[in-house]
Amino acid sequence: MTTQTNPNQATDKSLEAMRHFSEQYAKRTGTYFCVDPGVTAVVIEGLAKHKDELGAPLCPCRHYEDKEAEAAAAYWNCPCVPMRERKECHCMLFLTEENDFAGEKQDITFEEIRTVTNQG
């Protein structure tokens, strides 16, 4: 793995941690990544970036007035309360098999994520 070269990206360490977490959580909960791997890559990158900046994987798909306060409150830290309680993932990272956007994969490589996120 290389080190972080783009200041808009998460560190490799956080990206790999969130990638691993996402795969394990999908397998444990019987959920699947989005049929569009670009969605999965961008969401995992966003979680990792928040982990770097805030110390917690705050949901990257919501708007917050105060990210630090939200991360401390933990409600929207991944997996968020709606996901844990009802398997509702606003980010489309963890989808139930009946969801029209659910793919068949529960894994994604570090390189796949970086390929997508390096395009921005």
Image (cartoon, helix red, strand yellow):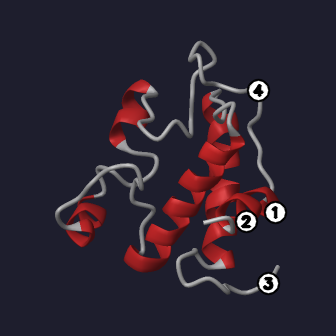
Which residue lies at the image location 40% right of the left edge and 53% below the top edge?
59
Task: Assess whether mark 1 and mark 2 are in contact (beta carbons under 8 angstroms).
Answer: yes
- Residue 26 in percent (x, y) is at 64, 37
Within the image, what quadrant is residue 102 found in? top right
Q: CA distance from mark 3 to mark 2?
A: 11 Å
Residue 114 is tagged as 2
Label 3 residue SS: loop
Q: Residues within 10 Å of mark 4 (few under 14, many from 20)?
A: few
Mark 3 or 2, which is nearer the eye? Answer: 2
Per the image, the residue denoted by label 3 is 2
Kind of element beneath mark 2: helix
**Contact between labelled residues 4 and 3, with CB atoms less than 8 Å apart:** no
Q: Is residue 89 above or below residue 40?
A: above
Q: Nearer the viewer, mark 4 or mark 2?
A: 2
| Residue at which label 4 appears | 104
Q: Earlier in the sequence, mark 4 or mark 2?
A: 4
Q: Position of residue 88 (x, y in %)?
A: 42, 29
Q: Which residue is mark 1?
A: 111
Residue 51 to residue 11: above or below: above
Label 2 to label 1, Cα distance in Å? 5 Å
User: Of circles 1 and 4, which is in front?
Assistant: 1
Amino acid type of disc 1?
Glu
